[in-house]
Amino acid sequence: MNLSTEVIEKSDKKKILKVAGEVDAYTAPELKANLNPLTEEEGAEVVVDLTEVSYIDSTGLGIFIGALKSAENHDATLRLTGLNERVKRLFTITGLDEVITIDDENTEEAK
Amino acid sequence: MERQSDYLEMTLPAKPQYVGIARLTVSGLANRLGFSYDDIEDIKIAIAEACTNVVNHAYEETGNMHLSCNVFEDRVEMVVADTGQSFVLEELDQNLGPVDSRKPIDELKEGGLGLFLIDTLMDKVEISGENGVAISMTKFLQRDEVENNVDGVSTETNAQEQK
């Protein structure tokens, strides 16, 4: 029931946030604390790698909505990648996949 | 007639770090009862959402959340209850739904998806609020059989067990 995050700087603009573990009410503040500063940089390209995330619920989804707003306000972009089928399903059910850019290319890892 | 069900309950502090404990408990229970992997994940999310609501909304200071589970042959009924301030139930229904992608991003809400998820992932949901809020969530085992199994030969799994 823990969460770990790591920021990988691909370039001045492009930052990858690798997230591992479970995102729930307890761990979401940590995700927020690590994600939001990235989206607050003007023109940033933020990619969140969720390959190692096994569980997420609405608290976590809320963090991504907040991050998306923040990105919009700072002319930055937010993209999610590496979602397993379960995690992807939650984004689909809630309609967030229509709002947030989600990569499809890594989904074969979940099989 | 329905056989007497097994019952279990636990009381947890209404704090974020205990939401995962409730989630693990129902996960273990659902696994023990033979729910499918996907159903177990659905149950975990529903319980976590209900507990998160308690943690975020029930108490001004500290309080407890109560998890109880009734296990039947064909389903599990789980209740997450608090003894805090009941929120206005009528207000909830209007907000129950997925994200509206036509709205400007700035108008998207960061909360409010929890009850929608519970409603979507569980087979039956009831919310009551008198002394606090109680959310009752039911998930059926082998759902397609319960809904409408055409050939009706599926009785051998549960129904023929010894009384």
Image: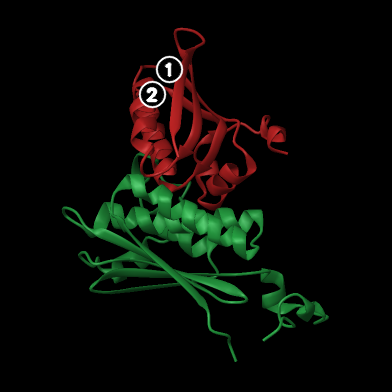
Q: Could you say which chain is coloured red in the image? A: A
Is residue A80 positioned above or below B110 on the image? above
Is residue A66 positioned above or below B58 on the image? above
Left or right of residue B73, residue B14 in this image: left
Residue assigned mark 2: A39
Q: Residues within 10 Å of mark 2 (few under 14, many from 20)?
A: many
Task: Name the subunit of mark 2.
Answer: A
Quarter of the image with the N terminus of chain B in it: bottom right
* Residue at 64% from the left image edge and 43% from the top image edge: A85
Q: Could you say which chain is coloured green in the image? A: B
Task: Name the subunit of mark 1.
Answer: A
Confirm or deny contact between disc 1 and disc 2 (CB under 8 A). Answer: yes
Spatial separation of the CA atoms under disc 1 and disc 2: 6 Å
Left or right of residue B128, residue A19 in this image: right
Quarter of the image with the C terminus of chain B in it: bottom right
Residue assigned mark 1: A44
Question: Quick one: which residue is furthest to the left in this view?
Answer: B61
Residue B97 seen in this snapshot? no
Tell me the element at label 2.
Answer: helix
User: Residue B2: x, y in percent?
Assistant: 58, 87
Residue B91 figure quarter? bottom left
Which comes before the other along the chain, label 1 or label 2? 2
Q: Residues within 10 Å of mark 1 (few under 14, many from 20)?
A: many
